Image (tube, rainbow, N blue to C red):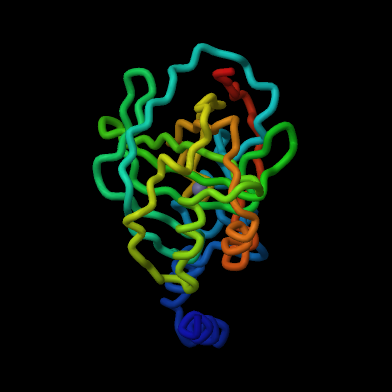
Amino acid sequence: MQRRDFIKGLFVLGACPACAQADFAAEAAHWSYEGQSGPDHWGAMAPDNAACSAGSQQSPLDLTGAVKAELAPLTLDWKAGGKIVNNGHTIQVTVPEGSTLSRGGNRYDLLQYHFHAPSEHHVDGRSFPMEMHFVPRRKETGTLGVLGVFLTPGAANAGFSRLAAAFPKTSGGEAAVDDVDPNGLLPKELTYWSYEGSLTTPPCSEIVDWMVLRQPIEVDEKDIRAFTTLYPMNARPVLAANRRFILSSF
Ligand SMILES: [Zn+2]
C-alpha cells in the first residue's frame, strides 16, 4: 500500500510516466467489495475483467422462478483434510487431490472451498448469513462446476467449528486442517438449482456450471461471527438473469 501511494504521488507530479501502467496493475490486484475498487468498478480495473461489466451471464443471481427439470443427481466423493488460507478476499480451504463431484456423465475434481458473508445467491429475494462455495473443475474442458451451500445459524456443525477455530486472522496466513471432512459440511438432501454463470470475483469469467443446494446447513452463530469479524461483507450483489433459465431438481 505504501509503495502504491508512493507511485501515485509520482504520477500526480508527472515524474514517472511509466508508472501509470504500474499503478493500474496495482489497482487491479486490489479489488474489494466497496468504494472505488468495489463490484461496480471491477470491469474497468483491468482488461481481463471486462466480463465483470460487459458479461450477460454473470453470477450470483436471485434464485427465483426456477423451472423444474430432470437434473442428474449429484454424487460427491470427498476426502478429508487440506490447508486453510486467508487470501485477503475470503477464507479458503485448498483440498488434497482425489475429491470428485459427478453429475450425469460429467466428473469434476474438487480444488478448494471458501466462504462469503452474506450469501451471494438469494432465494426469492432473500439472502442467508453465509454461503460456502465448493469449486471443482472438469478435467476435459477446464470449466468449473461451483457448488453453493447456504449457512444459517442453528446447531453447531463440528467441521465448520473446527474451521472457524483455525481461520487465519491475517491476510496470507495459513494452517493445516487435516481433521476437517468436507462431507460434514453438506445438508442431508442434495436437491439443487442449476444455471450457467460466472465466477463471482474478478475476472468474472463465464465458465461456471452453478449448482446451489436448496437445503442450508446449520452452523453455530459464533462461528459465523468468527468469519464476519474477518470479512463482514464479501458478497457480490446479485445480477440480472437476462435470458437464462434457472432449473431446479425439486
Ligand atoms: Zn465464491
Left or right for 5, reference 83 = right
Residue 50 visible in image: no
Q: Residue at x 32, y 19 (%)?
A: 105
Percent position of residue 226, x then y: 58, 64
In terms of depth relative to the viewer, which is nearer, 8 or 69? Answer: 69
Residue 176: image quadrant is bottom left
Residue 188, compared with residue 247, is above or below; it is: below
Side (left or right) of 21 relative to 149: left
Tell me where residue 92 appears, x and y as whole percent. Answer: 43, 56
Q: On the rendered structure, is 164 left or right of 34?
A: left
In terms of depth relative to the viewer, which is nearer, 229 or 63? 229
The outermost residue toward the right is 125
* Residue found farthest to the top: 70
Q: How many marks?
A: 0
Where is residue 32? Give x, y as percent.
57, 62
Quarter holding the C terminus? Answer: top right
Quadrant of the image occupied by residue 17: bottom left
> Residue at horizontal 61%, vertical 49%?
130
**On screen, residue 120 above or below 123:** below
Q: Is residue 65 visible?
A: yes
Above or below, 206 against 105 in this view is below
Which of the pair 244/113 is nearer the observer? Answer: 113
* Residue 183 percent coordinates (x, y): 41, 40
The residue shown at (26%, 30%) is 140
158 left or right of 225? left
The residue that appears at 52% across and 52% down in the rendered structure is 115
Against 123, is 116 above or below?
A: below
